[in-house]
Image (cartoon, helix red, strand yellow):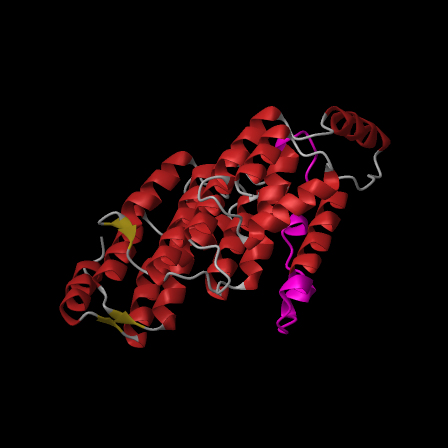
Amino acid sequence: MPKAMPEALSRIADSGLIGPEDVLAIRRIVYGDGQISADEAAWLLDLNHSAREYGEEWRALFIEALTDYTVHQLAPQGYVSPENVDWLIARIIHDGVIASDTELELLINVLEKAISAPGELAVFALREVKALVLRRNRISEREVTLLRRVLYAAGGHEGIAITREEAEVLLDIDHMRGGSEDDPAWVDLFAKAILNHIMFASGFSPPTREEALRREAWLNDTSVDPGRFMKNMVVSLREIVNAYRAPDVMEDYVRQRTERQVAAESITDVEALWLAERLLRDGRLSLGEQALVEALRAEHPKLHPAINAALTRMG
């Protein structure tokens, strides 16, 4: 370990400040030989935890270097292993929570840069954003952006559908909040994500996550018209449903997908019971849940009895 490392850690721990000149010196140390060692990665994490004040220069270096180490230098390159995930989470959790937005940004950046990462890393990142929402008591545009980035990145290069674990976190967030004062983009993201999960679990082949969760242009309409808002939301969700039925250039794939879709003409009993239980959790439908139910009703006019029973109980 270079002598400069413990000296810098001691100095920064005393002052609580990482200045631009410190960042230049740290960059020379960690990238001096072209790669970051385990000691250097641990040192960077200790520096970040010790610092009480730093600028964008440090934030950028910290995220870049730890992403390089986690994604590109721990074998196999580009693949975040369960061991890598355990190591990273253990090092950024302090007293049960992530200590700073910088460390949350690191988590999301690792997901975005990795070729593949275990699903628990995305779920962990979503739960950290949930904790952020709980502390701030509102789902702002920033939180929606963070959630969207995690969900996009978690799909990886295969663009797989929203998982049950991810859907559960999103439902928890909506249950915690789901208020009219939340950013409208949350309603859009929530409804599309849950619809994506249900359609996939029912046997449909999903479009990419980015296609399924894309942000609609109508959200930029700032006029106050709740009726139009819900109408646009439902239309948007119907378009997403159609994406599951879009033709494919590969004839065999189209035939196989059509067969799966025919076998999945309605929501399965398991999915219906799961959704009904969550709709009944607080006895009311949020805006996102309303849009989701209407989209399902448009797809299946005769909703599954379990969902109908839940809606009846809520009046």
Residue 79 in sight from this viewpoint? no
Residue 214 locus on image (x, y percent)? 65, 55
Q: Quadrant of the C terminus?
A: top right
**223 up-or-down from 259: above or below:** below
Residue at x-position 58% and y-position 38%: 312
Image side of residue 88 versus residue 76, left or right: left
Does the segment drawn in magenta span residue 72?
no
Answer with the quarter of the image where residue 124 lies: top left
Q: Is residue 215 magenta?
A: yes
**Where residue 1 sits in the image (x, y, percent)?**
22, 52
Is residue 199 visible in this depiction of the protein?
Answer: yes
Residue appearing at x 50%, y 65% in the figure: 141
Q: Residue at x 40, y 59 (%)?
A: 63
Span shown in magenta: 201-229
Task: Work out whether residue 92 or residue 278 is closer to the camera in this orientation and state it.
Answer: 278
Residue 217, quarter of picture: bottom right
Farthest residue toward the front?
Answer: 315
Considering depth in this image, is 81 or 98 the residue closer to the camera? 98
Left or right: residue 36 compared with residue 149: left
